């Protein structure tokens, strides 16, 4: 069992308790544990092996036992009992964005809805809007939610699949006679959502590799078991394809299976113009193999530099490669800081010390500690007095921390009319002001654009957080004219965030590219609420690379004095 199954079950437990009207503290405890376990990713399994589950924040003795039970058996007795106590199908309703436990209970009690098909049928026939407390708006919202669920089943957020893909690679490396192995397909290209997992291995014993793969306990169903290819489906419904080739063709096969399809087609055309033939088996002149062992060789034999997988979408990369104008893409090691981390001051769990320690461990030199502002009470936004106390603590902290500096920041609410949640004189005391929309998502396009443009223009705002507000698979972007936001950011010198939280990845790759081409700086922020989540920076780098960004396009690559200069805070530089 992987950590995702654990978090799903814990969330389900919380949902069922909520449907039953159980103790809110208990419900919150399950959610908090699920949230913290999510942040650990597959590290959870290691903790379990070492008997250290109790060290996870929010996981006490009782919960540690349940988590261990789930990891060992795939479920736990307590959960099974809860499930048996409520009508089947209700829990399924909760997977629809916009349907909480209370709505689910009403739907079940009044219309006997027991599943998603049921729900969709009733919503389409207009029956839901006739329920007390529902109405046409709710009904439309539920239909949108159902559409998101459907799409989410077809394509999953990359962040959900990436750890599992990495784990499979490690499992095959450890247990099967593979000489080389890689994730390919859209995952290797770092697309924000993916349909399935494509794996490629090189081996002299393909059959043994296939047999090992097919024998994994991971599969709910085996879809294919051939001599050099196999495919399985997980309990979650996720398909995994494996191809096994010889080492002499590994590079060509990796290139083919990485795609994208359009990139492949364009490469093949280019080869043909040069009198060559490119396929998954290699690059050939007549019947002679010209290149195939390494991807590098394949590109080089066609007169091209290596094209990073993130660029292989046929959006100009082949032309740029031919002209020698491919960007030198930013790399994780170019990053010196994280511009968006929450702390214990608002809804995070990290103290200033813990944040700095994690920064050090990740090779960072500075961190923007941005807590929520006063009106966002649900996320424990800071009053002005608390904010000032936090600023003082950070100043003191920095005096004793020469290697990792913290910036006194805030993620400040942009109100529906474009005003900010702290007065200007308070904003001016901060080192870093990140402005964000967390309320009134449903404004029309004109109002929302006007609202965000006001923040972009505000002279004390440095960064606009998650500019579209989308949550992959959960919430569509709000209506906003991003072209205008980018134009205005270019004019005013305001940076746009590349929020690296796996559910967000906001801005997405295409808009990052557009913004950078207009001279707008991007600011990668992990949006970590637990210090472990600062690792999400990796996700941000992947998106940045897909957006053709070089180190110079990001604020994260500046050193501390350079960053302060850009933020207009150079006076803090010497102490
Ligand atoms: P996905 O799975 O929808 O997230 O995106 P991909 O790109 O992983 O697509 P997938 O899994 O259908 O195929 C994996 C790779 O195989 C794809 O990136 C390129 C290659 N490929 C698949 N079908 C074709 C094809 O018809 N022609 C060419 N040239 N390549 C193909
Ligand atoms: Ca794929």
Image (cartoon, rainbow, N blue to C red):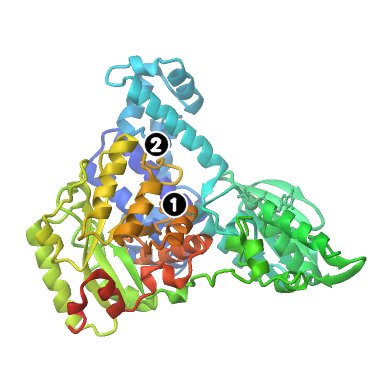
Contact check, label 2 and label 1, Cβ < 8 Å: no
403 is higher (above) or lower (below) than 274: below
- The answer to whether 324 appears left or right of 436 in the picture is right
Circle 1: is it few (<14), some (14-19), or many (20+) Cα within 10 Å? many
**C-alpha distance separating marks 2 and 1:** 20 Å
The residue that mark 2 highlights is 97
Secondary structure under badge 2? loop
Task: Check disc 1 and report its element: helix, strand or loop.
Answer: helix
Residue at the far front: name it.
Answer: 491
Which of the two marks, 2 or 1, is nearer to us in this view? 2
User: In the image, which disc is placed on residue 255?
Assistant: none
Residue 129, image x, y percentages: 35, 18
Q: Position of residue 457 (x, y in %)?
A: 25, 54
As displayed, is residue 526 above or below residue 111?
below
| Residue at x 46%, y 76% (from the top left corner) | 333
Quarter holding the C terminus is: bottom left
**Residue 197 percent across, percent down from the top left:** 62, 54
Residue 154 relative to residue 267: left or right:
left
Q: Nearer the viewer, residue 511 or 541?
A: 511
Q: Residue at x 27, y 43 (%)?
A: 450
Residue that badge 1 annotates: 6
- Residue 168 in sight from this viewpoint: no
**Of the pair 68 and 539, the residue shown nearer to us:** 539
> Around disc 2, counting alpha carbons within 10 Å, would you say few (fewer than 14), some (14 to 19), or many (20 or more)?
some
């Amino acid at each position: 069992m992987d950590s995702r199954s654990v978090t799903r079950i814990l969330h389900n437990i919380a949902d069922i308790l909520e449907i039953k009207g159980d103790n809110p503290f208990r419900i919150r405890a399950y959610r908090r544990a699920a949230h913290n376990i999510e942040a650990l990713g597959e590290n959870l399994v290691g903790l379990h092996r070492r008997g250290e589950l109790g060290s996870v924040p929010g996981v006490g003795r009782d919960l540690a036992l349940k988590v261990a039970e789930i990891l060992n058996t795939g479920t736990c007795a307590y959960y099974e009992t809860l499930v048996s106590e409520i009508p089947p199908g209700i829990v399924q309703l909760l997977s629809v964005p916009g349907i909480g436990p209370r709505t689910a209970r009403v739907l079940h009690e009044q219309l006997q809805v027991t599943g998603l098909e049921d729900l969709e049928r009733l919503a389409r026939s207009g029956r839901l809007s006739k329920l007390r407390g529902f109405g046409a708006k709710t009904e439309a919202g539920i239909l949108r939610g159902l559409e998101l669920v459907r799409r989410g089943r077809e394509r999953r957020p990359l962040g959900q699949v990436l750890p599992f893909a990495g784990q499979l690679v490690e499992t095959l490396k450890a247990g099967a006679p593979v000489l080389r192995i890689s994730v390919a397909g859209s995952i290797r290209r770092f697309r924000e959502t993916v349909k399935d997992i494509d794996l490629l291995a090189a081996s002299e014993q393909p059959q043994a590799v296939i047999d090992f793969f097919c024998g994994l306990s991971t599969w709910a169903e085996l879809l294919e078991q051939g001599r050099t290819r196999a495919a399985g489906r997980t309990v979650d419904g996720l398909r995994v394809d494996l191809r096994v080739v010889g080492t002499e063709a590994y590079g060509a096969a990796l290139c083919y299976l990485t795609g994208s399809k359009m990139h492949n087609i364009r490469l093949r055309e280019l080869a043909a113009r040069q009198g060559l033939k490119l396929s998954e088996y290699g690059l050939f002149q007549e019947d002679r193999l010209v290149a195939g062992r390494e991807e590098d060789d394949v590109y080089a034999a066609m007169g091209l530099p290596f094209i990073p997988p993130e660029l292989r979408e046929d959006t100009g990369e082949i032309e740029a490669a031919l002209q020698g104008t491919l960007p030198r893409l930013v790399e994780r090691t170019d990053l010196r800081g994280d511009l968006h981390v929450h702390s214990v001051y608002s809804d995070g769990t990290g103290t200033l010390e813990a944040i700095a320690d994690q920064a050090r461990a990740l090779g960072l030199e500075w961190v923007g500690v941005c807590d929520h502002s006063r009106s966002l009470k649900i996320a424990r936004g800071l009053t002005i007095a608390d904010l000032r106390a936090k600023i003082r603590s950070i100043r003191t902290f920095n005096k004793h921390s020469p290697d990792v500096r913290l910036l006194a920041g805030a993620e400040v609410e942009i109100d529906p009319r474009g005003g900010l949640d702290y007065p200007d004189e308070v904003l001016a005391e901060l080192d870093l002001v990140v402005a964000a929309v967390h309320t009134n998502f449903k404004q029309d396009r004109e109002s929302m654009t006007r609202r965000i443009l006001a923040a972009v223009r505000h002279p004390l705002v440095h960064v606009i957080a998650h500019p579209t507000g989308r949550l992959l698979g959960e919430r569509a972007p709000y209506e906003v004219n991003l072209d205008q936001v980018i134009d205005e950011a270019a004019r005013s010198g305001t940076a746009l965030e590349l929020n690296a939280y796996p559910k967000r990845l906001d801005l997405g790759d295409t808009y990052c590219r557009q913004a950078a081409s207009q001279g707008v700086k991007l600011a990668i922020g992990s949006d970590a609420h637990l210090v472990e989540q600062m690792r999400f920076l990796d996700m941000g780098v992947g998106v940045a690379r897909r957006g053709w960004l070089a180190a110079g396009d990001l604020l994260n690559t500046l050193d501390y004095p350079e960053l302060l200069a850009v933020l207009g805070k150079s006076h803090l530089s010497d102490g």
